[in-house]
Image: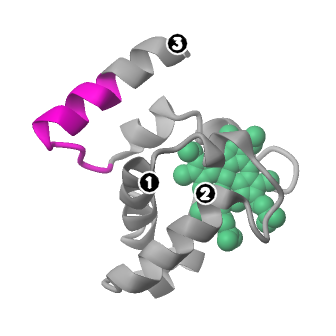
Amino acid sequence: MNNFFACLGVGALALTGAAHASPQLAIDHGCYSCHGAYPRGEAPNFESLASKLGKYRGDADAVAKFVTKYRTGEPLEHIDAHERLSAETATTLVHWLAEGGK
Ligand code: HEC
């Protein structure tokens, strides 16, 4: 996966205000390399992430709190792929997961 083009794509979406969450956004950010059908190490797969984050559905405050915690890597282990996300992209992805990640 070419990160340069992934970034361009996301940047263009952000500019047009059309950054809809979708599996493509997760693919672009390499999420599936750890959280895919064959999770790497202790990474939960997307299905269990979605059921875990389902409790934040419709609760923007809880999502925002989770996003902060998630991007700073506390109390989780530090994971570059998480910490590299902009607040906006992380929020979009967390919303998407809270809605079931489909
Ligand atoms: C290098 C591997 C790796 C990549 C890439 C990765 N993750 Fe993770 N992720 C993990 C691991 C490992 C955990 C579990 C950390 C823990 O429980 O301490 C985790 C946990 C999570 C959690 C749960 C946090 C919690 O509080 O339970 C979410 C949500 C998540 N990842 C989303 C994503 C998204 C979205 C992406 C794509 C931007 C992504 N991850 C990319 C390894 C990765």
Alpha carbon of mark 1 to alpha carbon of mark 2: how far?
A: 8 Å
Is 17 in the magenta?
yes
Magenta residues, start to end: 9-21
Q: Which mark is residue 87?
A: 1
- The residue at the point 44 percent across, 54 percent down is 87
Q: Earlier in the sequence, mark 1 or mark 3?
A: 3
Residue 91: name its quadrant.
Answer: bottom left
Q: Which mark is residue 2?
A: 3
Q: Quadrant of ligand 1?
A: bottom right
Residue 33: name its quadrant.
Answer: top right
At label 1, the amino acid type is: Ala
Q: Which mark is residue 71?
A: 2
Is 37 in the magenta?
no
Q: Residue 10 appears at what percent x and percent y?
A: 33, 31
Element class at badge 1: helix
Identify the main secondary structure in magenta: helix
Alpha carbon of mark 3 to alpha carbon of mark 2: how far?
A: 22 Å
Element class at badge 3: loop
User: Are dots 3 and 2 in contact, CB under 8 Å?
Assistant: no
Alpha carbon of mark 1 to alpha carbon of mark 3: how far?
A: 21 Å
